[in-house]
Image (spheres, rainbow, N blue to C red):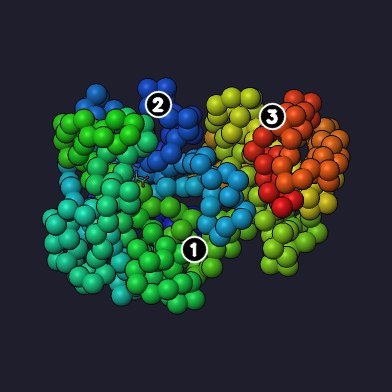
Amino acid sequence: MEGWQIRETFLRFFEERGHRRVPSASLIPPPESGLLLTNAGMNQFIPYFLGHAPAPYDRATSVQKCFRTNDIENVGRTDRHLTLFEMLGNFSFGDYFKRESCGWGLELVTEGFGIDPGRLWVSVYETDDETIDIWLDLGIPRERIVRRGKDDNYWWTHAAGPAGPCSEIFVDRGSRYGDEGGPAVDEDRYLEIWNHVFMQDEVDERAERRGELPAKNIDTGSSLERVATVLQDKATIFETDIFQPLFAVAESLAGVRQGEDERTDISLRVMAEHGRATTFLIADGVQPSNEGRGYVLRRMLRRLVSHARRLGIERPVIEELAEATIATFGGAYPELVENRAYVLQVATSEEERFGGTLRQGMALFEDAIGRASGTLPGEVVFKLHDTFGFPKELTRELVEDAG
Ligand code: SER
């Protein structure tokens, strides 16, 4: 199944079970969410879970563009870190609860996606015996059901709001990917593909329980990119069809191909991933700046440009990456097409601005790193930032790469 088929299969499955298909919300969340960027499919439904507004439907399904910023500098260096990803989800607002959610989850994974049930493992919150019984009834053997604590199996947005214990579905990708023993042993081999959250609590920003929600709700989330990795039997997220148009552009600009060299692979991945993610951010109205969301965008655009230079590309790259993103994802996210001219203008002007100072900044950096003994002086970091526009995170990455 290609990416678009996975999206459509998921949404249809839940539509056939009485769910309203709801479009993805913007990556810019409402201020009252307390979030910098939309980080889960449930964000747009928070007022319904909290009981602050009546839900216009009892059941919903969506494919939500999500953004997680904690790992930007890891993107490219691992097989699975992304900033932007698409989250497939189904939601119940005081309607069905655990049994239906787990049952439909298993049905879609095995019958809809065709994954062999013998490859599945599940996790449950440590005290949630009820969900263990549900999985046993559904035919998951006891030895492939694992109990996990609050760090792994309790979900909240990381801002104050709705929360709950959760149950995850994992696929065993086989001994090629790691050690036997289940998700507690190896999360590369046992890839988590779907999280079912039983939304019942209200918590503060540190996940301390403040009370009960007015109703018991369901919030599930499944990463489209991970499902594609499994269904297309790829070793990494980046080899799925979802990313191929972006890599085609990056490879042709750089004149190198994936898999030739670890160092160039990192830069190709940064170009593909950041090219896609920044296009989505700008299409939703984020502009490069020195704080908040705008700084996330600026950091990523500048990291992208510096990796393109590292690949020896001297000409502008962002326009072609943005065009490939719009062509690939514009069907599912029409706002990309609607805002095409604006995206290209914002992205290319940031590239020009930084492209103009990058070479001089790199010369300063090379000189300083040649003379530094173990530590790059703070005044160099400051000058790189102040005069040449290097975000400090970019300088840190260059310093690490220089050993
Ligand atoms: N909100 C949960 C998550 O992001 C399930 O959708 O994992």
Q: Is residue 400 visible?
A: yes
Q: Quadrant of the rendered structure where residue 174 is?
A: bottom left
Q: Is residue 207 above or below residue 292?
A: below
Residue found at x 27% / y 56%: 148
Cβ(mark 1) to ligand 1 < 8 Å?
no
Q: Looking at the rendered structure, which numbered label has been put on residue 34?
A: 2
Cβ(mark 3) to ligand 1 < 8 Å?
no
Q: CA distance from mark 1 to mark 3?
A: 32 Å
> Of marks 2 and 3, which one's residue comes earlier in the chain?
2
State the residue position of label 3. 346
Q: Looking at the rendered structure, which numbered label has been put on residue 193?
A: none
Residue 85, image x and y in percent?
49, 47
Q: CA distance from mark 1 to mark 2?
A: 32 Å
Classify mark 2: residues with Cα within 10 Å, few (<14), some (14-19) or many (20+). Answer: some
Q: Is residue 293 above or below residue 9?
A: above
Which element type, helix, strand or loop, lies under badge 2?
A: loop
Query: In this rendering, would 242 be left or right of 128?
Result: right
Q: Quadrant of the rendered structure where residue 167 is?
A: bottom left
Mark 2 residue type: Gly
Q: Looking at the rendered structure, which numbered label has been put on residue 229?
A: 1
Residue 17, image x and y in percent?
24, 51
> Of marks 1 and 2, which one's residue comes earlier in the chain?
2
Residue 236, image x and y in percent?
54, 63
